[in-house]
Image: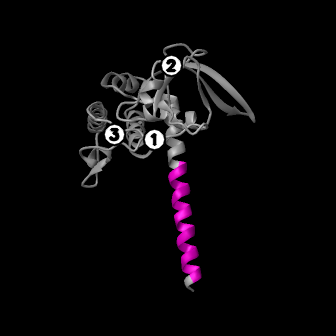
Amino acid sequence: MLHRTLKEKQDEIERKKLRAQQQKEKLVNAISVDGLWQTDNAVEAGLLCYPSVSRKIVALKQQINFRKFVLVQEASDKALFSFSKDKKQHSLEQLKQNLVRLISETQDVTESPAKRGRNQGGEEDPVIQNPELLVGKRVVHYFEEDGTRQGYNGLVTGLVPGTRTWFNISYDAEGENEIHTFELLDDYREGDLEILDA
C-alpha cells in the first residue's frame, strides 16, 4: 500500500514537471513568432499587428506568462501576473498596463552576481561570470535541424532587461530588424554558441 502511494506521488510529480515543460515550450514557440516585447513602444507596435481585441488579449497574456514561467521574473506585486480579479477578467487596457509595469520593473532591477562556471580547462570562464560580455559580440549559434548541426552567424544585440541568461540576437541571414530572444548562456555552456570576436 505504501509503495503504491509513493509510486502515485512520484507519477504525479513527473506529470506536473511534464506539464510545466510543455507550457514553457508553448510559450517559447509563441514568443518566437511575436518576439519578446521589452519596451512600451514594442507593446504598442506588437498590439497593432492584431486586428481583434480577443487576439490582442491572447498576445498580452502570452507575454505576461513568458515573463512569469520562462524568464521567472520577480515583480513588486504578484497581481501583475494575474488575468482576473474577484472572478472578473481584466480588460485589454489592464493587461497592457500590467505588462508595461512588468517591463519597467525589469529596467530598475539590480542584477545579482552571475553563477560561477568553469570551462573545459578548469579555469573560470569570464563570459559565465559576466554574461554582459556577450553583448555586441559576433557569434555562431548552432541548432540541430533534421539531425544535422547547423550554425548561423549573428550579433548579440543585448540582454533581456532583468535577466542574466536571456539575450536578443540578430542573425545575418535575416537582417538587423529581425530580433530573436534565446537563453544564450545555456547554449554557450553547452557548446552551441561560439564567439567569433573574442
Compared across the picture, whether 60 is left or right of 171 comes to left
Query: Most extreme residue toward the right, as rendered?
Result: 147
Q: Is residue 16 above or below residue 188?
A: below
Q: Is residue 104 above or below residue 155?
A: below
> What residue range appears in magenta?
3-22
Label 1: state its secondary structure. Answer: loop
Compared across the picture, whether 188 is left or right of 63 comes to right
Front-most of 1 and 140?
140
Q: Which numbered disc covers residue 30?
A: none
Q: Is residue 80 above or below residue 139?
A: below
Magenta region, mostly helix, strand or loop? helix
What kind of residue is marked 2? Answer: Lys
N-term-proximal mark, 2 vs 1: 1
Query: Most extreme residue toward the bottom, as rendered?
Result: 1
Label 2: state its secondary structure. Answer: loop
| Residue 106 horizontal/vertical position (percent) | 31, 34
Q: Which numbered disc covers residue 137?
A: 2
What kind of residue is marked 1? Answer: Arg
What kind of residue is marked 3? Answer: Ser
Foreground label between 1 and 3: 1
Q: Residues within 10 Å of mark 3 (few under 14, many from 20)?
A: few
N-term-proximal mark, 3 vs 2: 3
Question: Whole-Å distance between the Cαs marked 1 and 3?
Answer: 12 Å
Number of numbered discs overlaid on the protein picture: 3
Question: Whole-Å distance between the Cαs marked 2 and 1?
Answer: 21 Å
Q: Residues within 10 Å of mark 1 (few under 14, many from 20)?
A: few
Q: Residues within 10 Å of mark 2 (few under 14, many from 20)?
A: some
Residue at numbered disc 1 = 116
